[in-house]
């Protein structure tokens, strides 16, 4: 499983040197990870490289940056289970059992989208309470991306098309 870390996330994990990115053949095998602060708490943002499908995991929930990858394994499996797509659970388990490969984030467009997602998921100044990782991920995955004059797409639709599944878009 290839996880592309930003420089800041790698530093948070205590990784001094990252490998160059690799071309992967499995559709679930390329994720970008960064972090941001949401009401004084660190939150990891995990974005799929091809579809921009996004998950959020609170550092506080797992106990720090080094445990994010393990939690992501369980989060991805839980996501597929909750949508009744059990055959991908075996694929996820197989990818994680092959070992994790930590690489550099070399794709600037993904980083730009990640910056946009951070801004869109930040709470308004009048909102209080903890950052809701699930609600914010649903909001991001149902937000138009790659908007042109006549066209746009959604991360959830891209994820569905890539995997040949149907998770309904929230209206």
Image (cartoon, helix red, strand yellow):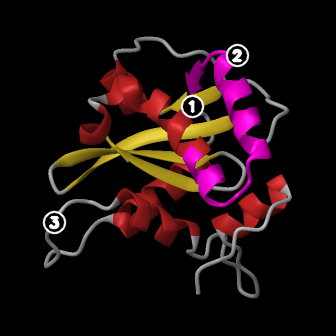
Dot 1, how many residues are within 10 Å of its Cα: few (below 14), some (14-19), or many (20+)?
Answer: many
- Residue 69 is one of the magenta-drawn residues: no
Name the residue: 73% across, 69% down.
Answer: 157
Of mark 2 and mark 1, the one earlier in the sequence is 1
- Residue 100 is one of the magenta-drawn residues: yes
Residue 38 position (above or below residue 139): above
Frontmost residue, 44 versus 148: 44
Q: Which residue is mark 2?
A: 98
Of mark 2 and mark 3, the one earlier in the sequence is 2
Q: Which residue is mark 1?
A: 4
Would residue 127 appear left or right of 55 to someone viewing this image?
left
Name the residue: 55% across, 75% down.
Answer: 143
Q: CA distance from mark 2 to mark 1?
A: 16 Å
Secondary structure under badge 1? Answer: strand
| Residue 14: image location, x then y, percent | 34, 15
Q: Are marks 2 and 1 in contact (CB under 8 Å)?
A: no
Residue 129 tag number: 3
Res 88 quadrant in image: top right
Residue 96 tag number: none
């Amino acid at each position: 499983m290839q996880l592309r870390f930003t420089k800041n996330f790698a530093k948070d994990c205590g990784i001094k040197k990252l490998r160059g990115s690799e071309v992967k053949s499995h559709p679930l095998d390329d994720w970008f990870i960064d972090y941001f602060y949401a009401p004084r708490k660190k939150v990891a943002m995990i974005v799929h490289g091809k579809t921009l499908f996004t998950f959020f995991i609170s550092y506080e929930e797992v106990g720090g940056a080094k445990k994010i990858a393990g939690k992501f394994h369980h989060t991805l499996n839980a996501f597929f289970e909750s949508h009744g797509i059990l055959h991908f659970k075996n694929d996820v388990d197989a990818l994680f059992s092959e070992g994790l490969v930590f690489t550099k984030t070399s794709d600037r467009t993904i980083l730009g989208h990640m910056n946009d997602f951070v801004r869109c998921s930040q709470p308004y100044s009048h909102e209080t309470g903890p950052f809701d990782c699930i609600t914010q991920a649903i909001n991001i995955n149902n937000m138009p991306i790659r908007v042109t004059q006549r066209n746009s797409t959604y991360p959830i639709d891209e994820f569905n098309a890539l995997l040949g599944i149907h998770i309904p878009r929230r209206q």
